[in-house]
Image: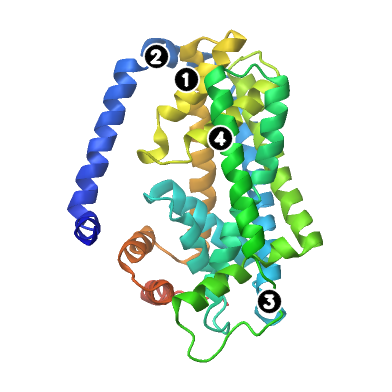
Amino acid sequence: MTAVLRLWRNGWVQAVTLLLLVVLAFVVIWWRGPEWGEVWQAFRFVAWSWIVLAFGLNVVSTLFRALSWRLTIGQALPAQHQPRLVHVLSAFGVGLFANAVVPGRLGELARVATLRRHLPDAPSGTSAALVGTVFAHRLFDLVPAALLVTWVLLTAEVPHWAVVALMIVAAVGLALFTVAWLGARRHQRPMMRDGAGTVRYLLGMARMGLSVLKAPLPLAGAILLQCCGWLLQLLAVYAAMKGFGIDAPLPAAGLVLVLMNIATIVPLWPGNVGLVQAAVALPLRNYGVPYATGFAYGIALQAIEMACGIGLGLLALAREGVSVAVLRRLQEEEQSSEDVREGFRDLVEELDREEAREGAPLSR
């Protein structure tokens, strides 16, 4: 097993594997995909004002999600080490960009590392606590997702294959939320102690990142903000649907949003391009939407989300003075580090060196 892991860490092995997956995805999409002439034809009749509206709704949705993470951090760190809101928003943007351009969905680690550099006086273990807040923040998606799934099952025309997928995802999500809630703890005890560095201690710090799960009012606020983010994303999906002239009710947009999220849970290849579009187009056939039009609509939806993540991420990178090369260094650290805290420390030092080379002062 160790030999396999060592082989997988080889850059050439990863590159060849990624290339094979991309080629396989391209062949399958081209062979079993829609009539491509009809797909391109669907873009000729798009009302682009609706697409712009969908993009704006996605941006505001991202803001609500970032505010939810800020509320989560407020329960995990002591008052004297609370980050400023602008730093949280910036770190969240870097995470969005990293998820869009770096394989492996490492955006969560990228936002932790970015935010940690703005807390120079925070004691050892803060990075692990921030990792816990990221995990808790991702768990909050389960509440609006569960509400959306229930609403979709009651109101939308859901294919039989999709019903099974929705039920499985709902059951797994409930189990994860229960385990996290039982493992969370508040930070009344001192956060740090001398000589800390064991895996057990780091896991304890990560559990403190879940502190918001034991604070009813902040927990309700964080979940409400996530629900607002999901609602705006639902409206964005519906607006894009109007842009393609798809005359389907709002529950159909909810079904599309749920299946899009399911299709991206496991990254089989970059962006799961093709799989996402099929997950969008297939259920829309029940509403009389041609498969090629639904596929084109799925391309637009994924492009809108990527444009939002990359656009906000570039603004955050410019503010932080961080290059894409440093984000790729994060991928290397995540693959090779045997000690979580050491990996974070090395990454933060790399971020500081990158900024020093560019001559920009570190924002505190």
- Using a 10 Å C-alpha cutoff, classify the residue at mark 4 as few (fewer than 14 neighbours), some (14 to 19) or many (20 or more): few
- Using a 10 Å C-alpha cutoff, classify the residue at mark 3 as few (fewer than 14 neighbours), some (14 to 19) or many (20 or more): some
Mark 1 and mark 4: Cα distance apart in space: 25 Å
Q: Quadrant of the C terminus?
A: bottom right
In primary-sequence order, the first of circles 3 and 2 is 2
In primary-sequence order, the first of circles 1 and 2 is 2
Task: Name the residue carrying label 4.
Answer: 168
Query: Do tag 3 and tag 2 residues touch (Cβ < 8 Å)?
Result: no
Task: Name the residue carrying label 3.
Answer: 187
Considering the numbered disc 4 on the image, is that residue within a helix, a strand or a loop? helix
- On screen, 119 above or below 163? below
Query: Do tag 1 and tag 2 residues touch (Cβ < 8 Å)?
Result: yes
| Amino acid identity at mark 2 | Pro
| Amino acid identity at mark 3 | His
Query: Do tag 4 and tag 2 residues touch (Cβ < 8 Å)?
Result: no
Task: Name the residue carrying label 1.
Answer: 295
Query: Do tag 3 and tag 4 residues touch (Cβ < 8 Å)?
Result: no
Question: Residue 90 placed where, x, y %?
Answer: 57, 61
Considering the numbered disc 1 on the image, is that residue within a helix, a strand or a loop? helix
Residue drawn at (49%, 25%) of the image: 279
- On screen, 180 above or below 19? below
Q: Quadrant of residue 160?
A: top right
**Label for residue 34?**
2
In primary-sequence order, the first of circles 1 and 3 is 3
359 displayed left or right of 132: left
**Label for residue 332?**
none
